[in-house]
Amino acid sequence: MYCFINGNILPVEEAKIGITDIGLLRSYAVFDYMRTYNGKPFGFEDYIVRFRNSAESLRLQLNYTDEEIKSTIIRLVEKSNVKEAGVRLLLTGGYSSDSISFDNPNFIIVIEKLPVYPSSYYQHGVKLITDEFQRAVAGSKTTDYLNAIKLEPIKKEKGAFDILYHKNNLVLEVARNNIFFFKNNTLITPKDDILKGITRKHVLLLAKDHFKIEERAVSVSEMWDMDEVFLTGTSKKIIPVVQIDEQHFSNGKPGANTKKLMEVFDVFVNNY
Amino acid sequence: MYCFINGNILPVEEAKIGITDIGLLRSYAVFDYMRTYNGKPFGFEDYIVRFRNSAESLRLQLNYTDEEIKSTIIRLVEKSNVKEAGVRLLLTGGYSSDSISFDNPNFIIVIEKLPVYPSSYYQHGVKLITDEFQRAVAGSKTTDYLNAIKLEPIKKEKGAFDILYHKNNLVLEVARNNIFFFKNNTLITPKDDILKGITRKHVLLLAKDHFKIEERAVSVSEMWDMDEVFLTGTSKKIIPVVQIDEQHFSNGKPGANTKKLMEVFDVFVNNY
């Protein structure tokens, strides 16, 4: 797999960054993650807009045009000799002499093996566990995953697929994904203090021909009363959720509306 | 300045880390920061215990003994040809193939120029601004400084020296330091959900011969009624605080009790 780092293309395992990078010393960095379908970066325009918004929220300059970034991604994917791949963009504050100030960001593009999830996740659904937490810059895709990685052993111990965050009694997001609910055939998903996924966006667009949609605050107590639950993510697409903590949803099986949306989404990306 | 990275000693500007380090990709890292007085690492035993506790809280293995670390620090300080220096220890989760799992931490020691603060800060005191925030792993010294670095422009705009965090109406800590108050000659400092500073510890030990001490929760509303305020930190020692947001303390000048503690602390470290 190949990567791009400040203008140079080289194998990922040879790419290095200086130890005074403020992304490393102070967690001051944004990233984004897209994937290819049929060898093409899917939804590039959406991902790059979000990446630029994240960068701007931390006052980080991205000194490359969309066209330069897109052509670099295509070149890296070809050079890495993979058809379907994950593509990580990372922009750190750059080197800092005092661990506070910075002025010259480091920009990295990494081609990664696309994670493959067991088909049983899609057929039978997964379990989430809840945790009270909100990321420091909730609307931006920063590298702020300390809490999520710290909870990995608890996740494994409980047999959970991922962690659902809530704060001030409101449901927010899964550690790396967005959450959706069905109640009486209405599709409901949280709106504020979350990272708005690109898959979330496509699901909302595709769903509007089939369901009533509500983007709004969802309280934790309301969540327990939902009919169906699923999560969305770039590499995961739509995965049904059949259990949150000790509570089962849709009789412990993927719900009919969720299955419908999974079909619609698959048709959409397979035609990309 | 020299550094140590996984067994190798080299100039700081030549030290690099691979881009798949989970400290960089997911902010999964702990650090600590000590300084020398008279060329010797001050309070090494306290800092190394805290560093090991931070590492343990993130399940990070530190594969070096205290003696190895101490002798490496002394060697690096000598090689860097500085008398007084800052010493940063950094332990990341190490390289990760999936940005989640890890098993071989990267350990780094960096010798840094010790920051020098203007004498006016000590003579006239500084201003803090408040922000509602609590770090994700509050008792550990992680690299979770995204919020603090993000607020730098606001800090500068308001002419503030640093940011005082509070959460759920309780005063916590300054972004990089601990906070203390005097009320009716009693020294009061927050106790929970903070990073317990080594300078904080020494100040509490030194103060107990002179003042009544209370380590306990301090509400934001109680804070506004305090007589004197100061902050403590490894490189800053004791700095008087004369303003928080729009409120002035001790008539806008360092208070008498604070000045007394500053003298006692200086005598203590100069005899180290």
Image (cartoon, coloured by chain):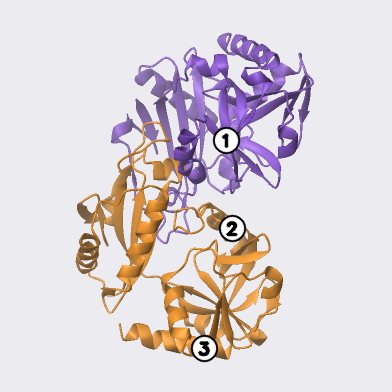
Chain colours: A purple, B orange
Percent x, y of residue B190: 57, 70
Residue at 47% x, 82% y is: B119
Three-letter code, disc 3: Lys
Badge 2 vs badge 3, beta-carbon distance below 8 Å: no
Q: Earlier in the sequence, mark 2 or mark 3?
A: 2
Crowding near the residue tagged with mark 1, few <14, some 14–19, many ≥20 C-alpha atoms within 10 Å: many
Q: Chain of mark 3?
A: B
Query: Which of the image's four quarters has the N terminus of chain B?
Result: bottom left
Residue at mark 3: B259
- State the image coordinates of residue A267 (x, y, percent, origin top left): 61, 9
At which x and y percent is residue A143?
50, 42
Is B163 located above or below residue A129 in the figure? below
The front one of A233 and A34 is: A233
Q: Which mark is residue B136?
A: none
Q: Compared with residue A124, is residue A29 higher up or lower down, i.e. above or below?
A: below
Label 2 sits on residue: B151
Residue in the foreground of this view, choosing between A194 and A36: A194
CA–CA distance in space, label 2 to label 3:
29 Å
Per the image, label 2 sits on a secondary structure element best described as loop
Dot 1 amino acid type: Ile
* Residue that mark 1 sits on: A129
| Co-location on one chain, circles 1 and 2 | no
Task: Please indicate whether residue A11 sits to the left or right of residue A50 in the image.
Answer: left
Q: Chain of mark 1?
A: A
Location of residue A16 by image quarter: top left
Q: Front-most of A138 and A168? A: A168
Question: Taking the image as drawn, is residue A92 in sight?
Answer: yes
Tell me the CA gap for discs 3 and 1: 51 Å
Marks 1 and 2 in Cβ contact (< 8 Å): no
**Residue B163 percent across, percent down from the top left:** 58, 65
Q: Amino acid at mark 2?
A: Leu
Label 3 element class: helix
